[in-house]
Amino acid sequence: MSEKAPGIYKPLAVIVAIIAIALAIWGSVTFAAVSGLIWEKGPAVWSWGAAFLSLGFGFWRVVGGIFWIVGTALFIMELAGFTIRNGRIVRQVIKWDSIDIAIAALVAAIYGGGLVATAGLIVIPGFTWIRPANMLSPVFGILFGIPGCVGLAFGNLIADALGGFLGFGSIGGFIGNFILGYIPYKLMKDPSLRSSRSVFEFYLWGVLVGSVWCSLYIAWWLDLVQAIAGLPPLFIWGWFAPFVMVNNAIVTAIVGPALAYVLYPPVKRWGLHWSDRITFIEKS
Amino acid sequence: MPYWEVLVGIGVILTLIGLALAAAKRRSGWMVTLIGMAFLVSFGIYLALLFTGIYGKVAAAGYYIPNLIGAILVIIGIGIWIKISKGKKEGVSG
C-alpha cells in the first residue's frame, strides 16, 4: 500500500496538515473566547459564526443540500450492497459474519463510549458537546471500512441516548457520523500513514472534507426539521455548523494520524483491514 | 425527546426489512438489521435512563452514571478488539 509516492506529496502533505491544524486551532481558540456570550448576543460574536452568516442562509441551504443529497445517496447505495470503485458503481460483498458484526460492535462501543465519556462538556444544549473521541472516526473508517462506518453511526446514536441528546437530529447525526468515516475510507488510496501521500490524503479527506461534510449534512437536516428539532437557522448555520467542523477537526488533526499509524500494522496483520474482508464484483 | 415514535418506527421498519432481506439470503440484510437494531437499542437506553430519572443529567449535580457507562463501553469495545485479534492470530476464521 505504501508505494513510493511522487515528490509532490511531501510539500502537499505539510501544507494541508498545517492548514488543517491551524484552522482547527484558530476555530477552537476563537470559539472558546466567546462561547459564554453566544446565547446572549448571538452567533455573530464568534468570527467563524459571523463569516458563515455573512454568506446567507440561502447559500448554506444550497451547499448543505448538495452534501446531504450526495451523502444520503452514498449511504443508501452502500446499504443496498453497491459502491463506487474506479469511477464506476459496482456490487460489493461484505460477509457480515461474526467478525464484521464484532468489528461494528467494537467500533460502536469504543466510539459511543468515548463520546459519552465527555458528554458533560455541553456546547449547545440538546445538540452537541465537546467530543474528543471524534478523532476515532476517520481512523476506524480507513481501518474497517463499512462495518467500521456502521459502528461509528451506531456509536453516535448510543452517545446521543446516554448523553441526553437523543432526538430528531439524531437521524442526521447517524448518517453524518457514517460519512465521517466513509469519506476517508473511500477516498484515501493509501491508508497506511507511512507515506507523504497517505498523510496528505488523511488531512485532506479525513480531517478537512470529512469534517465539513459531516457538519453540513447534520446542519442541513436540522434546518429541514427545525420545526421539530427546535434550533433556529441563525444558530444552525452561525453556531452549530462551524462548531461541529472545528469540533470534528481539532483532535482528529492533532492525534488522528499518529493513531492510524500505530493501529494500521496490527489490523492489517490480523486480516481485519477492510481490504482483506471485502469482495468487489466488477463486470468486465 | 419529541416524536420518539419516529425513531422507534425507523428502528422497527429497518429491522423488519433487514430480517426479510437476510432471510432472502441478501448479505446487506444484516447491515440493515444492525442499523434498525441501533435505533431500537438507543431508544431502549433512552427509556432506561428516563425511568431511572437521569436522562439528560450528564455530569450535572453528580450524575456521572452515563459517563461511567461510556467508560465501561470503551473497555468492552477494547475487550472485543483483543478477543477478535487473538482469534485471528490463532487462525480462527470468521
Image (cartoon, coloured by chain):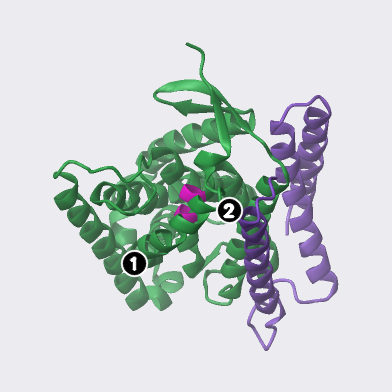
Chain colours: A green, B purple
Residue drawn at x 77%, y 63% as measured from the top left? B46
Q: Secondary structure at mark 2?
A: helix
Q: Quadrant of the N terminus of chain A?
A: top left
Q: Residue B39, can we see it?
A: yes
Q: Nearer the viewer, residue A82 or A7?
A: A7
Q: Secondary structure at mark 1?
A: helix
| Label tally | 2
- Judging by the rendered image, the residue that carries numbered circle 1 is A254
Q: Chain of mark 2?
A: A
Q: Nearer the viewer, residue A229 or A197?
A: A197
Sequence-wise first label, 2 or 1: 2
Q: B20 left or right of A280?
A: right
Main SS category, magenta section: helix
Q: B48 left or right of A52?
A: right
The percent position of residue A97, horizontal first and vertical second, equals 71, 42
Q: Chain of mark 1?
A: A
Magenta residues, as a range? A138-143
Amino acid type of disc 1?
Ile
- Judging by the rendered image, the residue that carries numbered circle 2 is A152
Q: Quadrant of residue A278?
A: top right
Q: Nearer the viewer, residue A101 or B66?
A: A101
